[in-house]
Amino acid sequence: MTDRVLTAIEGHLDQSTAKGLAHAVSAAIRDGALSAGDRLPPIRTVATQLALSPTTVSSAWGLLSRAGTVSTDGRRGTTVLGPLAPAGRYQQALEHQDGFALDLSTGVPDPDLLPSLAPALASLTATATATTGSYLDDPVLPGLADVLLDDWPYAVAELAVVDGAMDALDLVVRTALRFGDRVVVEDPCFPPLVDLLESMGAQLVGVPLDAEGLALEPLAAALSEPVAAVFLQPRAQNPTGVTMTARRARAITGLLHGTATLVVEDDSAAGLSPAPAVSLGRWRPEHTAYVRSFSKSHGPDLRLAALSAPPELMRSVSARRQLGQGWSSRLLQQVLLSLLTDAGTRASIDAARETYAARRSVLVTALAARGVEVGGTEGLNVWVPVHDETAAVVRLASQGIGVAHGAPFRVGHAPGGGGHIRLTVGLARDGFDELADAVAAAARTTSRSARAR
């Protein structure tokens, strides 16, 4: 058994580093050379046979353990685990009770503020046959590409249209990153991205946000060691509502000068943000991937996003897609093109943007009057500091108000030992004073006072 396992690992080992060894074990598992239940040899045996230091092997086992690939149990040794369990953070973020009178836990847009699809669907009757008739057509509708490129935040040669923002992020992550790579993410962050990166065995470094975006001093500290990629949401960051300024984007560019670090920007606020699009691609296009999705503005079920990336990465992403779905439905692309070019739809999106902004402003102002300060400037969500996260969620639930726990969004520990709740204010239509009263009281609630109630 030991010889078979070592042979399988050695066959995939191309770097004599902890990351290289972790990647070799991961590749051997993917290829079927190692299976769930296989026991890895002792650290000293692996070190001797593969001419590595015991410290390197121990570090590799640590990487694999954090990624959920192996389990280390003292004297019983290290064992290969089965397939990864469903994403933990995303499940936690989505878990909520049914039957709330006001469910603000979901992060979804208000369905009443989405544009009507009727005109766009009606326009398909004349184009459906031509749109669906070939495997060989351009994967991006030329007309849609023209419209998107006209509004892109920096000059790019081509775009891909994919099946939503997470599809774009998945393609970039699986193409550009290797097991054990250090990556910077916002803290707090969008839970599905954290799940995706951890499933790939990435080492996450959380960097907090301030009023202008990623905080510079913590980012500089994170960059003191090599970083493969930086992931950020440039507008209406979920969950905080922070939008990156052009000044901060330039400063981050300066910190990254001379590195090949890939910046991946997930812009989910297109259409709903009054702020102009700011991208590091303006200064470093050769190291920037930019994703623009339309789920919150035009409808979640469209499942469409546009992606630009450096040419070599774009070619690799396209090649990976050819092994799967190949392209995103050109029927749906035609619907999106109709929505983006229709005057009535544009007016509807403008009205939604103003309504969301008003709802957020009213609640944030009301919370401030009650001693609860909320950061950020825009978006569907507010990130509310609370004394005790669980107690706040339970208290609001007892009043028929659903909110999301903050823990799944955080990479590190909450500063100051407190917590947060995410509240989707975009779904609150009235009763803001009563809502602010309830949230402010919940923010001050402790486990003891919650039990007393």
Image (cartoon, rainbow, N blue to C red):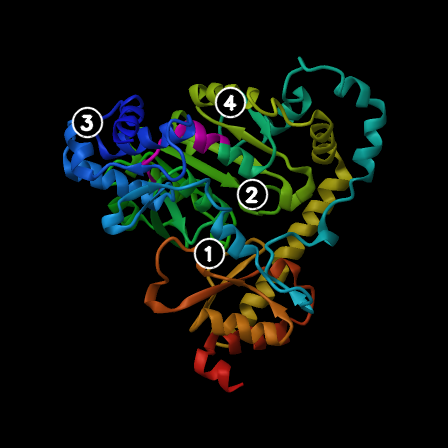
Residue 116 image offset from top left, x and y in percent: 78, 43
Badge 4 amino acid: Arg
Examine the image and state in which quarter residue 432 appears: bottom right
Of 86 and 293, which appears nearest the observer? 86
Q: CA distance from mark 2 to mark 4?
A: 23 Å
The disc, 2 or 3, on the residue closer to the chain's N-terminal end is 3
Reading the image, the residue beneath label 4 is: 320
Reading the image, the residue beneath label 2 is: 268
Discs 2/3, front: 3
Image height check: is 271 above or below 126?
Answer: below
Q: Give left or right: position of 99 versus 11.
A: right
Of 240 and 353, which appears nearest the observer? 240
The disc, 3 or 1, on the residue closer to the chain's N-terminal end is 3
Rendered-image quadrant of the C terminus: bottom right
Badge 2 amino acid: Ser
Q: Give left or right: position of 145 versus 122.
A: left
Q: Secondary structure at mark 2?
A: loop
Q: CA distance from mark 2 to mark 3?
A: 46 Å
Reading the image, the residue beneath label 1 is: 408
Residue 297 image offset from top left, x and y in percent: 65, 44
Q: Which disc number belongs to residue 50?
A: 3
Badge 1 amino acid: Pro
Of 311 and 196, which appears nearest the observer? 196
Q: Are marks 2 and 3 in contact (CB under 8 Å)?
A: no
What's the magenta region?
A: 171-183
